[in-house]
Image (cartoon, rainbow, N blue to C red):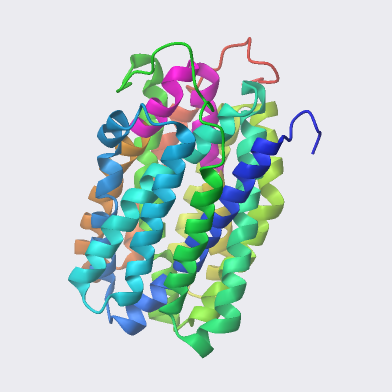
């Protein structure tokens, strides 16, 4: 890293992202097996739960409006602590209702952390380095997930699954403590920050973030479940696959971020959508565990390109509108996230997961013309989109 780019505050943010992602990785590494093996949930219950989990994201734009006076670093710390509380509660769950409550608590924290981490990173660098910083933070997150998955592989058979939720909460609490050491003026602007931002100029972002909710939620809800339910993949085996996926993202994320700064959002997002559509068709078509594993890694790699939506907003929005716009985007995204999970949960048993993958692929293709409509001012240095 060049010294003029990498600062002590970026180091603090990287540590925050590392422990936050470690906590999410520990929780995510055992969650699917916990749902199926410990609680005995079926695909319908998991998809319904996924839909309920996304409700806080749907309401984020209003919660963000209430918290807009709170500095970004304080919001990050509070979000991670709330996520820690929710994830720790998983260790005590023995019923579907109790699980839903724990899921909702953790979800409020997660959905507040999601746009804040991007705003913190982009608030610490120049606009022309938006992709660079988000790419590197994605690499840090990937490394943390690898560490978490490694712990699952080494300890899950010996300790069982529930202790990992406590390990997850501990990592998140450490991340919160580090976040609170960040300056309170990151992302601050002389202009007054609006409570809500919904403007015509951001319409391509709104459409793309809306469509993203479907493709992300379908795979996040049952991508791993398919492997556990139909191919009897264990927690340790699933963790190995996740490690492979995170290692690819760890190695590629800095380059992906640099591509967005050099080539622009229009080209890269369009290409990633075409690749995702093909990968979803593959996930529905292939019934070989090794091929499915490869497609799983490819899909998670292409999901990383969603940072382009954040960098696009950062390039065209004044600083005071960045976080409100990203928060509004999360809420818009969750219109489809919630709806998709509930509809998919009702249909998965009758139609099969393959049909849902085909449907998601079709929706992904709808994103392409809107990605091609993205325009960034020519004054933005280094952007040729």
Residue 163 in percent (x, y) is at 44, 78
In-front residue for pair 280/336: 336
Q: Nearer the viewer, residue 146 or 272?
A: 146
- The total number of labels drawn is 0
Q: Is residue 115 visible to the viewer in this orientation of the structure?
A: no
Question: Is residue 3 toward the left or the right of residue 20 in the image?
Answer: right
Image-based side of 349 in relation to 121, left or right: left
The picture quadrant where one finds residue 209 is: top left
Per the rendered image, the range of residues in magenta is 305-328
Which residue corresponds to the image point at 44% horizontal and 38% vertical from the top-left?
A: 74
Q: Is the residue 370 above or below the residue 95 in the image?
A: above
Quadrant hosting residue 160: bottom left
Residue shown at 62% from the left, 11% from the top = 378
Residue 323 percent across, percent down from the top left: 43, 28
In the rendered view, tell whether residue 299 sits above or below residue 310: below
Q: Main secondary structure of the magenta part?
A: helix
Residue in the picture at 27% in, 47% down: 56
| Position in image of residue 112 (x %, y %) | 38, 43
Question: Which one is in front, 194 or 257?
Answer: 194
């Amino acid at each position: 890293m060049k010294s003029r780019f990498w600062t002590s505050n970026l180091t603090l943010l990287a540590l925050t992202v590392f422990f936050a992602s470690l906590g999410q990785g520990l929780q995510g590494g055992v969650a699917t097996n916990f749902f199926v093996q410990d609680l005995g949930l079926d695909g319908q219950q998991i998809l319904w739960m996924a839909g309920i989990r996304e409700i806080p994201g749907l309401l984020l734009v209003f919660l963000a409006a209430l918290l807009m006076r709170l500095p970004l670093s304080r919001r990050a710390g509070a979000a991670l602590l709330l996520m820690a509380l929710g994830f720790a509660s998983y260790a005590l769950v023995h019923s579907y209702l109790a699980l839903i409550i724990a899921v909702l608590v953790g979800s409020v924290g997660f959905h507040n952390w999601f746009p804040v981490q991007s705003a913190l990173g982009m608030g610490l660098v120049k606009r022309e380095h938006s992709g660079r910083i988000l790419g590197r933070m994605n690499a840090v997150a990937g490394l943390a997930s690898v560490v978490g998955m490694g712990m699952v592989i080494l300890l899950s058979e010996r300790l069982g699954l529930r202790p990992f939720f406590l390990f997850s909460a501990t990592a998140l609490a450490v991340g919160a403590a580090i976040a609170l050491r960040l300056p309170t003026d990151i992302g601050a602007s002389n202009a007054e920050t609006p409570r809500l931002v919904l403007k015509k100029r951001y319409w391509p972002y709104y459409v793309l973030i809306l469509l993203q909710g479907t493709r992300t939620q379908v795979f996040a809800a049952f991508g791993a479940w398919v492997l556990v339910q139909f191919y009897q993949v264990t927690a340790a085996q699933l963790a190995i696959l996740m490690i492979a996926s995170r290692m690819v993202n760890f190695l590629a994320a800095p380059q992906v971020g640099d591509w967005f700064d050099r080539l622009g959002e229009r080209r890269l997002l369009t290409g990633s959508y075409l690749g995702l559509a093909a990968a979803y068709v593959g996930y529905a078509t292939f019934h070989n565990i090794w091929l499915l594993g490869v497609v799983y890694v490819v899909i998670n790699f292409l999901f990383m390109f969603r940072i382009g939506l954040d960098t696009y907003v950062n390039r065209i929005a004044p600083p005071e509108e960045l976080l409100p716009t990203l928060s509004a985007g999360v809420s818009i995204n969750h219109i489809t996230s919630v709806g998709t999970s509930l509809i998919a949960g009702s249909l998965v048993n009758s139609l099969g997961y393959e049909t849902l993958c085909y449907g998601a692929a079709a929706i992904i293709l709808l994103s392409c013309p809107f990605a091609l409509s993205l325009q960034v001012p020519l004054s933005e240095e280094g952007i040729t989109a």
